[in-house]
Image: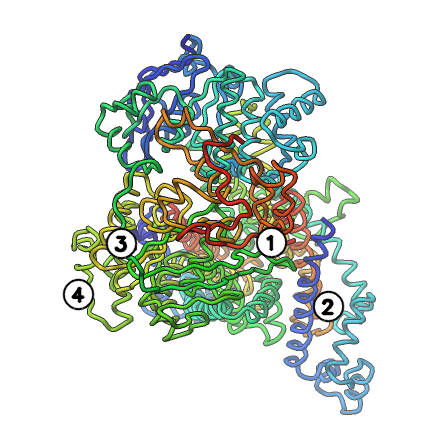
């Protein structure tokens, strides 16, 4: 019966979840796991991997492994704060637009405007308004998610409203609030959960992209994107410098996508 | 068709207008006094006032907005104060490069994504399905900035067969120009191509399940006729919609790719404008980006309506 | 002479849950020019059998073994290229849903000519000419113009004619028709059946008709094969099967099939019932892009306490809109609805809820009328809970509709269609209503389940004193439950009266034609009766005809009797013709089923 549960048990979702737990867990526990401070500079620059520096050191002699671990934390923040806020805001707006027709028109146009700023163009816009930095990343990710969740919620609820069981509930005397929480939202949930997985993937991508082009997290603060940005100057000296954040960011994006795929599969198979 | 376009236009104009308002007012309200920024920290009040006057910053904000909008419509985009050049000229110089990059990427994406998607949607072999499925999910997921750097690492740093950046001679010297274009275009095309392939495959599978396909088989049609006349045309509309969104997002991707490969295009110009706090250049470029997205959406909607009579009638 | 033989055909679906044998050792013969019915309820394997004949079963289905011999040649051994010449050549097929069976993007011309060209080498021009002939052959008016239309411009009946034209393109020896009229209204069904019979008669085309409807079998087919759970359990001539069925399943099927000629069980018809629901001059219009669609156009009726009123009509006649208006789901454009003497239009909030405690609804599709995320107990308990009543009554309600109390803990998807409909009824009963509106409540069910649900409704009425407004398109099942019957056409009631009288001696020509269209599950009757087959289709409610709305199709109207201009100009009111019976016709009672052909 529960397609989501079946989806979470699919091989894709299992692999994705495993990767997400390992990577995000490592980021969460960075203060415990990291062998060095991510900011501590030493004279040993561009050291090759060794027992003390598992991934070697960077141009200031900082421990790369520690910097990558701490870099993951930025994505943790984006995923745990910006995505939920955007998702909730979008869902609420989507629900509101199913109530009144005129509000629907207004909100849909607003979504159209937001969508016209595709993810990175939105990032540039936000950075231009409030200046580059982690807050710009958080706001961008939040804003980008609003129309995604809003449209999804609106369309799901609109189509559910015409279902017989919703009509039936209404005429056995179920009031609007209970109707929403017992009949409409639970049945719209499937699509929202899949979108959440895809949104997390998008969030990691946007953080990386904004930091990479220099309008997100900025050095010396480590993030997967900012590490990659600095590393390309030293590609011929230290390929590992670039490879480490590349692998982690790809793993995260792919893992969230896999979870989304697995969930979709679970929901489709009836 | 034309009537369908006319019906779609008003909403698109409203969205564009709303976007221009958002861009203008958000940037103006946040960037403090552009004249002070421009004059520098040591400038006297008189200098700042003079600059303010010359830029029309004395006018009420809404009047400034109207002046800006009129400028955009008439092609008078103003002057960039960080690059000290007319913005129209700056855009003219970089637009060609970005168009070249985007066109190259789009060509690769449509060809590659089309072939892979068709195979994925029509070949029943499990191994083919699994391999193509894995490849395309990788293509969708791996961020452009990762593939770009990886390409440089392999082809420019390790094997030194392709230039690591720059635009080269462009298409005036085709052979060399293509060498410069190859890596950026590939990097930019991967997510688009992979997304296209996946949607095409899903749409083909869905279409193959439709009743009219059964009718076609029962009629005794050849497979080629069945695919070209019935399956593919019905599978296309959702794919063109997705392709439209993807094309609209190419500019975002171009910002990344241009950064990696030092490709002097619109994306680079936009980043320069933002980091240099050149509000006018930023405004103009953002508006262009949004307008391109909206226009592409309309074009794909019209194409869908041209293919499918139901869309034309549904919104009649 | 035997034309087509199926021999020990086995088709299996290899699903994730293990192999499912859809067709098990099916064998039958078809003579040239014969009409054979493959009868069975949903899931009996009849459609898969048809696809197996053409070797068109798609994965995960596979034909495991058996032979399909056409003129002695085993089709299952043919290569793909040879098989292609057979499909649409010697063996053609038409499907249940004609609208989705046509490519929506291609004009009908292209779809017809490609069918012609798939089997005959000829210039395109000639193929297009042939397409015109085929369209004419299947009775599509103005064929040349219609060829330039996309399928979405065709009604269901016309689309099915296009499908038949396409099936004829290769001049087939056999047409396999898979539930060809199930998606169509009964008057359109009669037209399509007539067309198939005519093709069989005049061209000698054999027909394999796949259907669940025994009436259609009796009307059209010479021989019958009855399928049950993938097997043919019985076959023989139509007369043998209907008069002396041997297999238990066949007997049950025949007994469950509603019939207009069989005496129906006694009906509680209170002498002078206390009026419960009163509907006066009800209209409902929908506006869409400057045009007005009048779904209900001035309807008056009442339902008395303890009474069952049947409301019958074809799709689009406005009967479901009436259900929504009565329940308060939609507001009428004008007119009055009162219940127990007080008006019930425009109710909101608590008043609406109080009203719905007395009037409930049972839907057509039991699959969609239960929330998939609530257990049966929660679904039935919800009306009780929102009223603050005792939810322990759930078990009692389940028992009332013939389900075990243990059902409460399970989810809707664990139940069959018939069981779900019982759950829906239990939920409606939870509010202890007086009147239940049943909107096509049995239409989605197989006939054996229909009979059970109808028996349940009748039983509940006797025990609880319920009243029903029973809305349906199937005259026989509506007659079986209702004491009085209202017949609707294009938003208006054209006839009302006691059900058995209306179905025996209809007064309105539309009611007469409708009755004549319903195939009777009795080959004897079907052979002897003269049928009124209505020409043309129901006009659009966007632009209803002036005067009598039925005059554009009426067999006794100005089309047949040019002098009767009154039908074009004056709307006939619904007037009492004899005690208890009314008809909205200038010439009521003139058309009797057996007195008039066409």
Q: Which residue is mark 3?
A: C423
| Label 1: how many Cα within 10 Å (few below 14, some 14–19, many 20+) | many
Distance from disc 4 to disc 1, alpha carbons, whole Å, reads: 54 Å
Distance from disc 1 to disc 2, alpha carbons, whole Å, reads: 22 Å
Q: Residue at x 60, y 53 (%)?
A: B245
Between label 3 and label 1, give the one nearer the viewer. Answer: 3
Q: Which residue is mark 2?
A: B284
Subunit that carries the residue with mark 1: B
| Label 3: how many Cα within 10 Å (few below 14, some 14–19, many 20+) | many
Subunit that carries the residue with mark 2: B
Q: Position of residue C182 (x, y in %)?
A: 43, 36
Between C267 and A197, the one lying in front of the other is: C267
Q: Which residue is mark 1?
A: B245
Distance from disc 2 to disc 3, alpha carbons, whole Å, reads: 62 Å
Mark 1 or mark 2: whose residue is earlier in sequence: 1
Label 2, secondary structure: give it. helix
Q: How is the image coloured?
A: rainbow
Distance from disc 4 to disc 2, alpha carbons, whole Å, reads: 68 Å
Q: Residue at x 65, y 45 (%)?
A: C565
């Amino acid at each position: 019966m529960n397609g989501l549960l079946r989806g979470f048990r699919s091989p894709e979702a299992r692999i994705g979840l495993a990767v997400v737990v390992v990577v995000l867990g490592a980021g969460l526990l960075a203060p415990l796991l990291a062998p060095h401070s991510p900011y501590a500079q030493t004279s040993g620059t561009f050291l090759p991997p060794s027992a003390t520096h598992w991934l070697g050191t960077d141009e200031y002699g900082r421990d790369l492994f520690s910097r990558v671990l701490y870099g993951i934390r930025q994505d943790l923040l984006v995923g745990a704060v910006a995505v939920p806020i955007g998702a909730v805001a979008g869902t609420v707006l989507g629900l509101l637009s199913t109530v009144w027709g005129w509000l629907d028109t207004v909100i849909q146009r607003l979504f159209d405007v937001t969508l016209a700023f595709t993810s990175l163009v939105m990032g540039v816009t936000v950075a231009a308004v409030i200046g580059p930095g982690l807050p710009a990343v958080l706001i961008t990710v939040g804003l980008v998610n609003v129309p995604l969740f809003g449209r999804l919620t609106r369309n799901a609820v609109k189509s559910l409203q015409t279902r017989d069981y919703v009509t039936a509930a209404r005429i056995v005397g179920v009031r609007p609030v209970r109707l929403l929480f017992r009949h409409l939202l639970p049945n719209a949930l499937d699509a929202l959960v899949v979108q959440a997985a895809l949104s997390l993937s998008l969030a990691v991508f946007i953080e990386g992209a904004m930091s990479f082009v220099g309008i997100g997290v900025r050095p010396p603060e480590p993030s997967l994107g900012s590490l990659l940005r600095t590393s390309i100057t030293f590609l011929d000296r230290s390929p590992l410098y670039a490879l480490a954040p590349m692998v982690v960011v790809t793993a995260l994006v792919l893992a969230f996508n896999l979870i989304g795929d697995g969930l979709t599969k679970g929901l489709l198979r009836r | 068709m034309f009537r369908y376009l006319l019906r779609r236009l008003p909403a698109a104009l409203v969205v564009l207008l709303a976007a221009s308002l958002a861009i203008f007012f958000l940037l103006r309200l946040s960037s403090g006094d552009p004249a002070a920024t421009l004059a520098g920290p040591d400038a006297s009040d008189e200098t700042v006032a003079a600059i303010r006057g010359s830029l029309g910053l004395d006018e009420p904000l809404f009047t400034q907005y109207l002046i800006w909008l009129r400028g955009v419509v008439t092609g008078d985009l103003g002057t960039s104060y960080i690059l000290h050049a007319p913005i129209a000229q700056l855009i003219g110089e970089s637009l060609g490069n970005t168009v070249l990059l985007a066109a190259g990427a789009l060509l690769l994406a449509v060809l590659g994504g089309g072939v892979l998607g068709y195979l994925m949607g029509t070949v029943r072999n499990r191994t083919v399905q699994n391999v193509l499925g894995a490849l395309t999910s990788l293509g969708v997921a791996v961020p452009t900035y990762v593939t770009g750097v990886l390409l440089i690492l392999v082809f420019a740093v390790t094997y030194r067969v392709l230039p690591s950046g720059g635009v080269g001679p462009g298409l005036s010297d085709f052979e060399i120009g293509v060498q410069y274009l190859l890596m950026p275009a590939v990097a930019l095309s991967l997510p688009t191509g992979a997304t296209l392939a996946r949607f095409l495959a899903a749409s083909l599978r869905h279409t193959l399940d439709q009743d009219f396909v059964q009718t076609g088989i029962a009629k005794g049609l050849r497979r080629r006729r069945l695919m070209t006349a019935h399956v593919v045309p019905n599978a296309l509309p959702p794919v063109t919609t997705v392709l439209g969104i993807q094309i609209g997002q190419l500019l975002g991707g171009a910002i990344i790719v241009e950064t990696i490969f030092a490709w002097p295009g619109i994306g680079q110009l936009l980043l320069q404008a933002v980091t240099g706090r050149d509000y006018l250049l930023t405004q103009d470029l953002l508006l262009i980006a949004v307008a391109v997205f909206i226009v592409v959406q309309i074009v794909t909607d019209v194409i869908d309506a041209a293919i499918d009579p139901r869309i034309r009638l549904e919104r009649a | 002479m035997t034309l087509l033989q199926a021999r020990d055909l086995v088709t299996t679906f290899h699903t994730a849950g293990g192999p499912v044998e859809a067709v098990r050792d099916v064998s039958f013969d078809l003579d040239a020019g014969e009409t054979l019915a493959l009868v069975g309820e949903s899931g009996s394997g009849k459609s898969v059998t048809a696809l197996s004949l053409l070797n068109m079963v798609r994965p995960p289905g596979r034909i495991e073994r058996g032979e399909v011999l056409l003129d002695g040649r085993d089709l299952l051994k043919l290569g793909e290229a040879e098989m292609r010449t057979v499909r649409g050549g010697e063996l053609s097929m038409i499907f249940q849903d004609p609208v989705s069976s046509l490519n929506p993007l291609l004009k009908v011309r292209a779809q017809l000519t490609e069918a012609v060209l798939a089997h005959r080498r000829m210039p395109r021009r000639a193929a297009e000419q042939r397409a015109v002939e085929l369209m004419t052959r299947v009775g599509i008016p103005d064929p040349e113009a219609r060829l330039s239309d996309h399928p979405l411009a065709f009604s269901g009946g016309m689309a099915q004619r296009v499908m038949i034209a396409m099936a004829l393109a290769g001049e087939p020896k056999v047409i396999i028709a898979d539930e060809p009229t199930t998606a169509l209204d009964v008057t359109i069904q009669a037209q399509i059946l007539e067309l198939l019979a005519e093709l069989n008669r005049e061209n000698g085309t054999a027909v394999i008709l796949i259907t669940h409807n025994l009436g259609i079998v009796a009307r059209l087919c010479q021989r019958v094969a009855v399928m049950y759970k993938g097997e043919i359990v019985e076959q023989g001539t139509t007369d043998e099967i209907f008069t002396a069925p041997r297999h238990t399943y066949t007997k049950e099927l025949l007994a469950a099939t509603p019939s207009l000629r069989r005496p129906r069980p006694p009906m509680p018809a209170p002498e002078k019932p206390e009026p419960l629901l009163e509907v006066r001059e009800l209209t409902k219009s929908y506006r869409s892009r400057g045009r007005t669609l009048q779904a209900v156009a001035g309807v008056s009726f009442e339902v008395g306490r303890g009474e069952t009123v049947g409301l019958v009509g074809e799709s689009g006649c406005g009967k479901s809109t009436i259900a929504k208006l009565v329940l308060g789901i939609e507001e009428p454009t004008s007119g009055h609805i009162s219940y127990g003497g007080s008006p019930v239009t425009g109710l909101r909030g608590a008043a609406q809820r109080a009203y719905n405690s007395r009037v409930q609804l049972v839907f057509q599709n039991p699959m969609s009328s239960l929330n998939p995320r609530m257990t049966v107990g929660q679904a039935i308990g919800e009306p009780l809970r929102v009223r603050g009543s005792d939810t322990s009554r759930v078990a009692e309600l389940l028992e009332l509709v013939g389900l075990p109390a243990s059902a409460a803990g399970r989810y809707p998807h664990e139940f069959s269609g018939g069981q779900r409909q019982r759950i829906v009824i239990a939920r409606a009963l939870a509010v202890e209503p007086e009147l239940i509106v049943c909107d096509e409540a049995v239409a989605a069910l197989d006939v054996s389940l229909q009979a059970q649900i109808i028996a349940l409704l009748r039983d509940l009425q006797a025990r609880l004193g319920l009243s029903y407004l029973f809305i349906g398109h199937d005259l026989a099942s509506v007659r079986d439950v209702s004491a009085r019957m209202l017949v609707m056409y294009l938003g208006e009631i054209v006839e009302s009266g006691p059900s058995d009288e209306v179905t025996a001696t209809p007064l309105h020509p539309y009611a007469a034609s409708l009755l004549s269209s319903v195939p009777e599950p009795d080959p004897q009757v079907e052979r002897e009766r003269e049928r009124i087959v209505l020409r043309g289709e129901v006009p659009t409610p966007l632009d209803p005809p002036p005067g009598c709305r039925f005059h554009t199709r009426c067999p006794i109207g100005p089309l047949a009797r040019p002098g009767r201009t009154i039908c074009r100009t004056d709307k006939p009111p619904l007037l009492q013709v004899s005690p208890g019976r009314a008809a909205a016709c200038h010439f009521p009672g003139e058309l009797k089923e057996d007195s008039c052909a066409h």
